[in-house]
Each structure stands twice: as structure tokens, then as C-alpha cells.
């Protein structure tokens, strides 16, 4: 696991300070123990004046957004970079902010960690508040020299915790390793082919496809088995998709169904999503069929 830490200074033309953090340490088996400093440690290390305060004295944090509220969906071999942001305020002004995602039960010994990249953009809203944006990059696979990647195991797909912090100019800080949760999911891919094309009206179309999803461990797309999908149809000239029937991927990830051809139009498979895989939906490309 590469270590990336960013605490953004907020004052007019913004300065950037990067702190050194301990490297993640791989352990035996299929899991990795990741030495993730808590949000309080991240913020405290950036200012000698940091101090403990009551909740009423601490900075306030609001409007925390991860990937614009959408699930972070990552494929098998390509890194995914997404934006995170928050608004922080304090009577003394805001000196720094921090956001990360982590997976597991212990924030300082996580199963997975997605810290922010260097580079922060902050916009002062008032003399005492600012909205700050940064990016996080999630890389699938075993991509670290220690044999640990950001998303090194398929078991990491699902719900992650979001850590959030803000440091005020007077040294007071807000730090929460459990601010909210967010989905990090495996990308799914659907294909479809309807035949024969063209087809005589009233004859039966054979409609086949495949359903696969990203395998972060192998860097490939693996069969996605025993999943229920919708076969949908959009009549030529219409903009509305209509459910025709339910189909199911078999033990090889293959989908096979049929339907009588009545009108010209486009066919597709539709998957409504799962907690670990491409939510809220996955659709195949449309296959247009001419009915004569």
C-alpha cells in the first residue's frame, strides 16, 4: 500500500503540506493489516498547536460528498480516481482538512485504506468557513512492492467507512473515523445478442448474453453467476424501456432466453445492482432488431 496523506491549508492562495505516514504492512494469508493513522493523528501531526477541545469548541464539518454521492465502481485493471469534498467552519478560520475511506473494524489496523492524493482545492465561503475538494485513487490488484494493493481482494467490495477531519487556525480540531459509510464496488459488464436479424414478424428471437464482473485479485473479469436480470425492449420511435421478462445468468455467467418478435426495436439486459457490484444498475448495449 502506497502511503498518501494530504492536509490542506486554507488561506487565500492555498498552500499544501504532505506528512509522512507509516507504510502498510502485509500479513500472511489473504488479508493485509494496514497501519492507518487515525484522523486525529493525521491532523495532529500537521500543527504543533493542535489541542483537545470540547465538541462546542471544535470545527464543524458538513456537506461531506464522496464521488458526488455515487458508489465508487472499480474495474479489474484500471485505477479509479474520484473526488471527495467537505465544508468546514470555525470562528478562527480553517487551517486544514482531511478525508479518507477505510475498510474493516479497527481504523488503525484496517483491511483496506484509500487515503487522499496530494493536491487540494479550497474555496473560502466566508472568513470562517471553506469548502475543500481533493481526489482519491483506488487501484485494483496486488500493486505494491509489499504485495498489497488498494483493492487487493474481492472481499473488500461493499461498505467502507469515511474518515473526516478539520483543523482550525487556533489549533482545535474535529476528527471522526466513522463519519459516514460509502460503497466501493466491483464493475459489472453485460453483453447481448438477439438473432436472427432481420426476423419475420411472429417468429421467435433467440436472445443471449454474458454477465461478468471485475475480479480485483486476478485483474480479469470473471463470470457473474445465478443473477436475476430483466430483458427489456424499446419500440422503434419510443424513448421508453419496458420489462419483457426475467432472465438469469447460469453457472457460467451466460444468459439465454427467447421472445416472439412483433415490432422493430432494441433489446437489452438490465441488472438492478447488488451491494458489492455496480449499483444502482448495469445495462448491456442495446441490440436493434428489424422485424419484417
Image (spheres, rainbow, N blue to C red):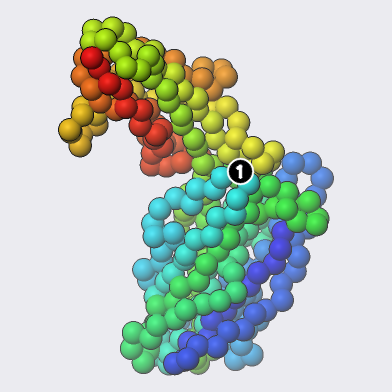
- On screen, residue 205 versus residue 249, left or right, reads left
- Which residue carries the number 1 mark? 76
Q: How many numbered marks appear?
A: 1
Indicate whether 35 appears above or below 90.
above
Q: Does dot 1 land on a helix, a strand or a loop?
A: loop
- On screen, residue 149 versus residue 75, left or right, reads right
Of residues 124 and 77, the one drawn nearer to the viewer in this rendering = 77
| Residue at the limit of the structure toward the left, as seen here | 237
- Residue 115 placed where, x, y %? 60, 65
- Residue 271 placed where, x, y %? 39, 31
Q: Residue at x 41, y 33 (%)?
A: 284
The N terminus, quarter of image: bottom right
Snapshot quadrant of residue 204: top left
Indicate whether 237 appears above or below 11.
above
Residue 48 in sight: yes
Residue 54 in sight: no
- On screen, residue 104 versus residue 200, left or right, reads right
Q: Residues within 10 Å of mark 1 (few under 14, many from 20)?
A: many
- Residue 142 placed where, x, y %? 73, 49
Snapshot quadrant of residue 100: bottom right
Q: Residue at x 35, y 17 (%)?
A: 197
- Residue 248 placed where, x, y %? 43, 19
Q: Residue at x 55, y 55 (%)?
A: 80
The C terminus, quarter of image: top left
Q: Residue at x 52, y 67 (%)?
A: 135
Of residues 158 and 14, the one drawn nearer to the viewer in this rendering = 14
Amino acid at each position: 500500500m502506497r502511503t498518501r496523506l494530504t492536509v490542506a491549508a486554507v488561506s487565500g492562495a492555498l498552500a499544501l503540506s504532505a506528512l509522512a505516514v507509516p507504510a502498510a504492512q502485509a500479513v500472511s494469508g489473504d488479508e493485509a493489516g494496514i497501519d492507518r493513522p487515525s484522523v486525529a493523528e493525521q491532523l495532529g501531526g500537521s500543527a504543533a498547536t493542535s489541542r483537545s477541545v470540547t465538541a462546542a469548541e471544535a470545527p464543524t464539518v458538513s456537506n461531506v460528498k464522496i464521488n458526488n454521492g455515487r458508489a465508487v465502481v472499480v474495474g479489474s485493471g484500471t485505477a479509479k480516481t474520484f473526488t471527495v469534498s467537505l465544508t468546514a467552519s470555525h470562528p478562527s478560520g480553517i487551517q486544514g482538512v482531511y478525508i479518507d475511506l477505510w475498510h474493516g473494524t479497527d481504523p488503525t489496523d484496517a483491511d483496506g485504506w484509500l487515503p487522499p492524493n496530494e493536491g487540494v482545492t479550497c474555496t473560502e465561503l466566508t472568513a470562517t468557513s471553506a469548502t475543500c475538494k481533493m481526489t482519491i485513487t483506488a487501484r485494483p490488484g496486488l500493486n505494491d512492492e509489499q504485495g498489497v494493493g488498494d483493492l487487493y481482494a474481492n472481499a473488500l467490495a461493499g461498505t467502507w467507512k469515511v474518515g473526516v477531519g478539520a483543523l482550525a487556525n487556533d489549533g482545535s480540531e474535529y476528527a471522526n473515523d466513522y463519519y459516514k459509510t460509502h460503497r466501493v464496488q466491483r464493475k459489472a459488464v453485460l453483453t447481448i445478442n438477439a438473432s436472427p436479424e432481420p426476423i419475420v414478424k411472429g417468429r421467435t428471437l433467440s436472445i443471449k448474453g454474458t454477465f461478468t464482473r471485475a475480479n480485483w485479485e486476478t485483474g480479469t473479469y470473471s463470470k457473474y453467476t445465478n443473477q436475476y436480470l430483466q430483458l427489456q425492449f424499446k419500440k422503434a420511435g419510443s424513448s421508453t424501456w419496458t420489462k419483457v421478462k426475467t432472465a438469469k445468468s447460469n453457472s457460467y455467467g451466460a444468459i439465454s432466453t427467447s421472445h416472439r418478435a412483433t415490432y422493430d426495436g432494441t433489446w437489452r439486459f438490465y441488472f438492478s445492482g447488488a451491494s458489492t457490484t455496480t449499483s444502482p444498475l448495469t445495462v448491456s448495449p442495446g441490440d436493434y432488431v428489424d422485424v419484417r
